[in-house]
Image: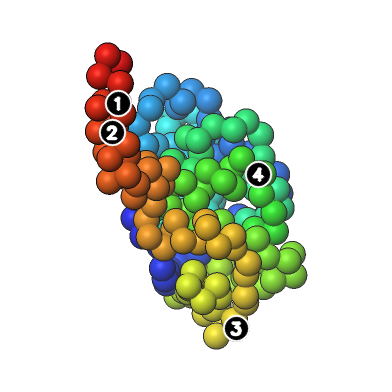
Amino acid sequence: MQKFTKLSGIAAPMPLVNIDTDMIIPKQFLKTIKRSGLGVNLFDEMRYDDDRNEIPDFVLNKPQYRETQILVAGDNFGCGSSREHAPWAIADFGITCVIAPSYADIFYNNCFKNGILPIALPQEQVDLLMKDAEKGSNARIEVDLEAQTITSSDGEVFSFEVDPFKKHCLINGLDDIGLTMEKANAIESFETQASIARPWV
């Protein structure tokens, strides 16, 4: 998993509430167990028409938002089923930070396990960042995880809270496997001692 320290990127505005995981990645794309390749189907039913042509009015299809790295969204983002494919699709598209007033718990925790920083801010601050994101590709938002700050394109700074352990994992690029591998020497030592003590196992 890639480390997350600072991000300066284009933010896309999605002023919708209750964006659920089926909207993020529809159920027909859940057959794969690979984390890659799902970005093309992110928000599939909103991005494409029945003939698989892009819908020009959808925000991620607009030229100024094709390189989006930050998503500014409405309340209760990631609700619905607990599919981990949702953060997989977001990350594969290239988005590594989501800003919203609130999240569904399972989606929120899955984000950290997949290199995405989900930031919860009061509605009035999200509204200000939403307006900033509406400026398009000329407005870049900076996210500093170490300082726990967001800086708008106009230089306005917002502070955010994040669990210290989750922050540690993102900064060091540690998913569940990475956390386990940090204990590799202790695991190897235990297995060696266990083999000596119980050679019949």
Crowding at label 4, few (<14), some or many (≥20) Cα neighbours within 10 Å?
Answer: few
Crowding at label 1, few (<14), some or many (≥20) Cα neighbours within 10 Å?
Answer: few
Q: Which amino acid does label 4 sit on?
A: Asp
Foreground residue among 16 and 124: 124
User: Label 4, label 1: how many angstroms apart (C-alpha)?
Assistant: 43 Å
Q: Mark 2 points at which residue?
A: 193
Q: Toward which corner of the image does residue 92 lie, by quadrant?
A: top left
User: Label 4, label 2: how many angstroms apart (C-alpha)?
Assistant: 40 Å
Task: Report helix, strand or loop for mark 3.
Answer: loop
Residue 105 circle label: 4
Q: What residue type is labelled 2?
A: Gln
Q: Name the residue under label 1.
A: 197
Q: Mark 3 points at which residue?
A: 156
Q: Position of residue 178 (x, y in %)?
A: 35, 47
Q: In this view, does 120 lie above or below 6?
A: above
Task: Name the mark nearer the viewer: 3 or 2.
Answer: 2
Q: What residue type is labelled 1?
A: Ala
Residue at the (68%, 65%) spot, across then down: 121
Q: Do the residues labelled 2 and 1 touch (CB within 8 Å)?
A: yes
Task: Report helix, strand or loop for mark 4.
Answer: helix
